[in-house]
Amino acid sequence: MKKESLQEQSPVESFFSIRVGTDEFAGKVKQIATGMELDMGDFNIRDFLLAFSGDALAGFVRMRKYSDCLELSTLGVLREYRKKGLGKKLVLALLDKFPGEKVFVTTVIPGFFLKCGFAKTENYPDSLKPKINFCHSFGFGEGEVHIMVQSTHGPG
Ligand SMILES: CC(C)(COP(=O)(O)OP(=O)(O)OC[C@H]1O[C@@H](n2cnc3c(N)ncnc32)[C@H](O)[C@@H]1OP(=O)(O)O)[C@@H](O)C(=O)NCCC(=O)NCCS
């Protein structure tokens, strides 16, 4: 690769590769995501995108599919790879796979998802209500759990 093209790449592009989840990583993702107290319901590794730094797993995210909506879920970046743009890169890569679709997220960190193009909403499907209770079960109060939605992300 020419020196100029390396310089044109953003750091996050050059450090991380992203691919669809495969069985060999299911155990590791389960273990790390459980440690981060993330949603493990309806776990299927093929719903995940995994990020790698070389051969090392650096992060993951999945689209959880309900009968009436899609929810971005189970987003985690391993501590040593945080604050490098990987979380946002994973979110945008997942949204790219569902162009034009309305995607919800249930979260206690709305500031992060605002930066990924989501907006808070009070208008969400009933299937997400158990997820709000899941967040409350970890001690988060009423005003701390937010449902957000994005429907503007698409090609172009
Ligand atoms: C939340 C998490 C995925 C962020 O990953 P990350 O790779 O550090 O995030 P990024 O570097 O891509 O951050 C993108 C932007 O969001 C901001 N941001 C990151 N974490 C944030 C947070 N917790 N609250 C608000 N903003 C945040 C960054 O400052 C950055 O802003 P900038 O674009 O203006 O510089 C990571 O901290 C994590 O895995 N946390 C534990 C699990 C978790 O909370 N998952 C989400 C459950 S809904």
Image: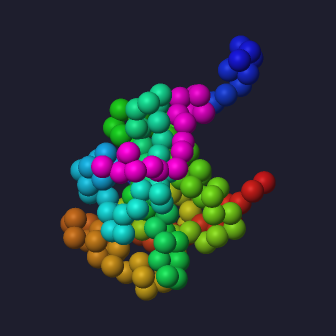
Magenta-drawn stretch contains 128: no
Q: Which residue is drawn at 56% across and 55% down?
A: 94
Is 5 located above or below residue 152 in the figure? above
Can you name the residue that lies furthest to the right here? 156
- Count how many numbered circles sit on residues in the image: 0
Determine the image quadrant of residue 45. Answer: bottom left
In the rendered image, residue 148, in percent from the top left (x then y), is placed at 50, 69
Q: Which residue is drawn at 42% across and 68% down?
A: 106
In the displayed structure image, the side of residue 132 where residue 52 appears, left or right:
right
In the rendered image, residue 101, in percent from the top left (x then y), is placed at 64, 70
In the displayed structure image, the side of residue 7 where residue 89 appears, left or right:
left
Q: Residue at x 53, y 29 (%)?
A: 15
Is 3 located above or below residue 89 in the figure? above
In the rendered image, residue 111, in percent from the top left (x then y), is placed at 47, 55
Q: Can residue 76 be seen in this view?
A: no
Front-most of 104 and 114?
104
Question: Dividing the image into 4 quarters, which one contains the N terminus?
Answer: top right
Magenta-drawn stretch contains 25: yes
Question: Dividing the image into 4 quarters, which one contains the C terminus?
Answer: bottom right
Determine the image quadrant of residue 151. Answer: bottom right
In the rendered image, residue 60, in percent from the top left (x then y), is placed at 43, 48
Segment tinted magenta in the rendering: 11-27
Front-most of 82 and 50?
50
Front-most of 52 and 109?
52
Q: Is residue 101 visible?
A: yes
Is 59 located above or below residue 43 in the figure? above
